[in-house]
Amino acid sequence: MLAKVKSALCIGIEAYTIEIEVDISSSLPQITIVGLPDQAVKESKDRIRAAIKNSGLVFPSRKKIIINLAPADVKKEGPIFDLPIALGILAASGRLNIKKLNLFCVVGELALDGVLRGIKGALPIALSLKGSNKKLILPAENANEAALQNDVEIFPVKSLEEAVMFFNNEKTISPHTVSAEKYLRNRQKYEFDYNEVHGQALPKRALEVAVSGAHNILMVGPPGAGKTMLARRLPSIFPDLTHEEALEITKIHSASGTLRSKCGFLSLRPFRSPHHTSSTISLAGGGPLPKPGEVSLAHNGVLFLDELPEFNRSALEVLRAPLEDNVVTIARAKGVITFPANFMLVCAMNPCPCVTQSKLTDGKHSLSPFSLN
């Protein structure tokens, strides 16, 4: 018997529909997954078998099971397909309502006991379903994040057993809704606040001018002068995020798997401070399935580069395009992906030792804690 389940996959910060086809036939027991799966997807068959059995359900162990992830020419990665594959197997074996299953897009990672774990990219997946008349089944951990898209009905489930009961009309689950405007009104405070800085009149004034005019800034001063301390508190004097800006930031962090907010919504401007050993790909983004880099994770916020001269020249060169165009474009053999990258660049460095020594020994000059460029 053949069953089809709609699912989705994030490529960059956009989500695309994946159709999972499950065919069960009488033959030598075997599970085969085709359609360019990565290692995590290949290993899902063992997780799914254990999850089905530990949920008190019957796994067709004496059958040949072929699972196709279409389109077959797109690389599939991650454990996001665990739940739809499990439901497809149960539907193909006649233990699930296929007609109701066809109304939903399903995503989720399964634990061995059948409990659902959170996934990456819940918000982009929900946004991709807008206008498709599809409803979304996903782990309860991602419910707030996905429900920011008000045009799609979100049904959170906690386990495989609960999902099966829902599709067989043995349990009712109400659509989950949240209010992004409420989160913006009751936004949390920044961990580091500009009001905590005492003194430092010159650099504080320079930073305020830079924020007001959307300028980038370089701070030069000896260790301990307070460069990093000021930079960390800079987001707190930015204007509050609008709903569109907050949604865009949340979408980027959701796709990259860096969303740590319990409410599933980022209402504060990001502050990113990559180490000077960071690679070009980690700054600009990339990978087999390109992911956002630090320049995109700092979108609508601050990108702070401490010890600027220690960064590789190639890493600094990749900042040229996003600083000029506010986007970064990643080109690969199978396609081109563009990430937003509109950030304020704040850099810090120590003064050149030879210049510092000459100023200290020259009686006509005095050494200031800061030099701002």
Image (cartoon, grey):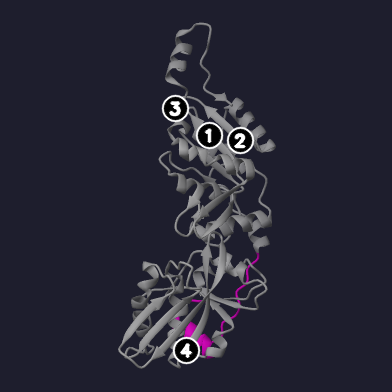
Left or right of 74? Residue 123 is right
Alpha carbons under labels 4 and 3: distance apart: 66 Å
Q: Nearer the viewer, mark 4 or mark 2?
A: 4
What range is drawn magenta here? 157-179
Farthest front residue in view: 333
Earlier sequence position, callout 4 versus callout 2: 4
Alpha carbons under labels 2 and 1: distance apart: 8 Å
Q: Residue 1: which quarter of the image?
A: bottom left
Q: Position of residue 48 (x, y in %)?
A: 38, 79
Look at mark 3 in the image and give the residue it sits on: 223
Earlier sequence position, callout 2 versus callout 1: 2
Q: Is residue 238 above or below residue 308?
A: below
Q: Position of residue 339 (x, y in %)?
A: 58, 53
User: Callout 3: 10 Å neighbours few (<14), some, many (20+)?
Assistant: few
Q: Are marks 2 and 1 in contact (CB under 8 Å)?
A: yes
Q: Are marks 1 and 4 in contact (CB under 8 Å)?
A: no
Look at mark 1 in the image and give the residue it sits on: 347
- Total labels: the figure holds 4
Look at mark 2 in the image and give the residue it sits on: 216
Quarter of the image where the C terminus is located? top right
Q: Residue at x 53, y 56 (%)?
A: 253
Kindly tell me whether residue 301 is visible in this rendering.
yes
Alpha carbons under labels 1 and 4: distance apart: 58 Å
